[in-house]
Image (cartoon, grey):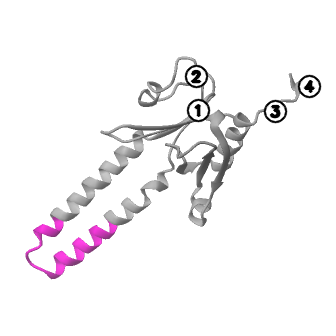
Amino acid sequence: MRLVTPGDSAPASVNKYLLPHETQVITVRRHPAVLMMPVGLVLAGLIVAGVVSNTVTSVTWIWWGWLILLAWFVWRVAEWSVDYFVITNQRMLLTTGLITRKVAMMPLAKVTDMSFRRTIAGRMLGYGDFVLESAGQDQALDTVDFLPYPEQLYLEVCEMIFPNKNPSDD
């Protein structure tokens, strides 16, 4: 089962990084669990601000601090909304960043080993991490964390890297 059907197009923020002869196979956004820490910090900050404002009289500064924390959270959500992991018929790309756009990529032909990890939280929430290795030196793309559907993605990518060369399937 393909995660992107033929004819679907990548988001415009990703499409401009695809080569004219590339075919998009999979495009996924990172799992929303990547936002767990920012959500926890905003909620903890709100609780602290509420408790402190009930005990101390001059606490305008604590609410300004919480608003800064909230603005940081909104920034992280905006970044998450434009970050994509894309697999084409020739390479893997990870696009990140809201203002400073970074595109890390690895050609599928250079991938010598790939595995995925799932922590307990990842198994409960449905995300995993890919670890990519190449015969070359340090690669721009070696770990992709918080990927949804890790087993399905893993099988899809392995099928692309190691296609069935059995001539009876033609």
Question: Which amino acid does the dot numbered 2 rest on?
Answer: Glu
Q: Which residue is mark 4?
A: 168
Q: Are marks 2 and 1 in contact (CB under 8 Å)?
A: yes
Look at mark 1 in the image and give the residue it sits on. Answer: 91
Mark closest to the chain's N terminus, 2 or 3: 2
Residue 87 shows up from this direction: no
Q: Residue furthest left?
A: 58
* Residue at which label 3 appears: 164
> For mark 2, does the 10 Å Cα neighbourhood hold few (<14), some (14 to 19), or many (20 or more) residues?
few
Give the alpha-carbon distance from disc 3 to disc 4, as whole Å: 10 Å
Q: Identify the secondary structure beneath mark 2.
A: loop
Could you say which quadrant of the image residue 38 lies in? bottom left
Residue 42 position (above or below residue 106): below
Name the residue tied to disc 2: 22
Q: State the extent of the magenta-drawn residues as a range.
A: 43-63
Counting from the top left corner in percent of width and height, residue 154 is at 67, 45
Residue at 60% of width from left, 23% of height from top?
Answer: 23
Q: What's the residue type where badge 1 is placed?
A: Arg
Residue 60 in the image, given as x and y percentages of width and height = 11, 68
Q: Are marks 3 and 4 in contact (CB under 8 Å)?
A: no
Q: Is residue 58 magenta?
A: yes
What distance separates the C-alpha of mark 2 from that of mark 1?
Answer: 9 Å
Report the amino acid beneath label 3.
Answer: Asn
Callout 3 crowding tier (Cα within 10 Å): few <14, some 14–19, many ≥20? few
Position in image of residue 59 (x %, y %): 12, 72
